[in-house]
């Protein structure tokens, strides 16, 4: 039992900080972008902050990542409380909503780049802490790329869905926005139910790997190249 608890503690110690940084910066970036574009709703509610307590969602930030770690899932992601946006307050709603929606995934890509750059300084980290620091940085790198790509999927209520809704002609945008009420159910089906059914039938139906894993790997190579590792 002691060994199991020790393993859990070690695992959590290299994931807690990456998860908190990823979801906190993602949501704070949405709020900051909205503030710059004229909507101070998030700022007035204390959401334009790097304090993770303002953004933590008990299920999406704590239980979901913990569950995925517990079952040793091949991927890890989570989410924070959505930042409140009042589209009517944006100076140019359709244009500015693209900026606000893209700010979250953009922040994740910047964090991934920062993690990749910090890997260069591992040589100066005390030997006793090198493995722990390196694992935190690698997890920060991988998690942020997965979150960035996942959130850019063109499915409401994800950021990609909001971007696409803002870019489409008005009639098509209305129809896509109407899908938001079913978006979460669709995502759960794609990520969890479809692979489970596929396994029962002897088929490989890991849609998450196709739609997120492969683009994230391409993006990882690009970021590593920019950071001077490739």
Image (tube, helix red, strand yellow):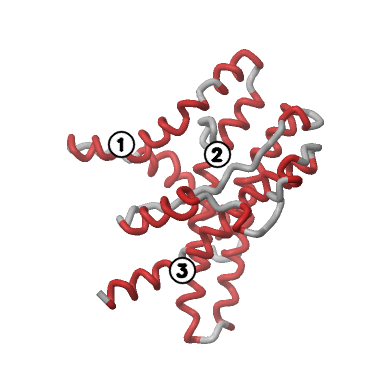
Name the residue at the top extreme. Answer: 171
The residue at which mark 1 appears reads as 193
Which one is nearer the viewer's eye here, 108 or 123?
Answer: 108
Q: Mark 3 points at which residue?
A: 14
In the structure shown, which secondary structural element does the residue marked by tag 2 occupy? loop
Q: Above or below — where is 98 with respect to 116?
A: above
- Report helix, strand or loop for mark 1: helix
The residue carrying pointer 2 sits among few (fewer than 14), some (14 to 19) or many (20 or more) residues within 10 Å by Cα, namely many
Give yes or no for contact between labels 1 and 3 (Cβ–Cβ under 8 Å). Answer: no
Asked if 39 appears above or below 117 in the picture, the reply is: above
Q: Earlier in the sequence, mark 2 or mark 3?
A: 3
Q: Give me the residue at 81% from left, 37% from top.
A: 38
Quarter of the figure with residue 178: top right
* Residue appearing at x 55%, y 17% in the figure: 175
Measuring from the top left, give residue 5's x and y in whole percent. 32, 72
Per the model, the C-alpha gap separating discs 2 and 3 is 26 Å
The residue sitting at the bottom extreme is 127
At 63% from the left and 53% from the top, the residue drawn is: 54
Q: Give the number of marks.
A: 3
Q: Name the residue under label 2.
A: 152
Which quarter of the rendering shows the N terminus? bottom left
Left or right: residue 107 versus residue 140 is right
Please state which of residues 145 and 44 is positioned toward the viewer in this rendering: 44
**Other residues around mark 1 within 10 Å, as few (<14) / some (14–19) / many (≥20):** some
Image location of residue 28, percent across then percent down: 67, 50
Residue 7 screen position, x and y as percent: 33, 72
**Residue 186 at x, y percent in the picture:** 41, 30
Query: Between residues 69 and 75, which one lies in front from this camera angle?
Result: 69
């Amino acid at each position: 039992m002691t060994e199991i608890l020790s393993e859990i503690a070690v695992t959590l110690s290299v994931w807690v900080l990456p998860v908190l940084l990823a979801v906190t910066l993602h949501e704070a970036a949405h709020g900051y972008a909205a503030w710059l574009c004229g909507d101070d709703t998030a700022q007035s509610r204390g959401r334009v902050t790097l304090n993770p307590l303002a953004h933590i969602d008990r299920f999406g930030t704590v239980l979901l990542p913990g569950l995925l770690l517990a079952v040793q899932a091949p991927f890890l992601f989570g989410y924070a409380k959505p930042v409140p946006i009042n589209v009517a307050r944006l100076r140019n709603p359709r244009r500015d909503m693209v900026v606000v929606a893209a700010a979250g995934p953009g922040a994740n890509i910047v964090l991934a780049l920062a993690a990749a750059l910090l890997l260069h300084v591992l040589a100066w980290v005390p030997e006793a802490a090198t493995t722990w620091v390196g694992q935190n940085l690698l997890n920060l790198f991988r998690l942020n790329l997965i979150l960035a790509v996942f959130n850019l999927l063109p499915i409401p209520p994800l950021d990609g869905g909001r971007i696409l809704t803002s870019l489409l002609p008005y009639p098509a945008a209305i129809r896509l926005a109407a899908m938001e009420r079913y978006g979460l159910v669709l995502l759960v089906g794609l990520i969890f139910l479809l692979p489970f059914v596929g396994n029962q039938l002897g088929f490989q139906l890991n849609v998450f790997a196709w739609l997120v894993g492969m683009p994230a790997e391409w993006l990882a190579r690009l970021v590593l190249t920019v950071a001077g590792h490739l």
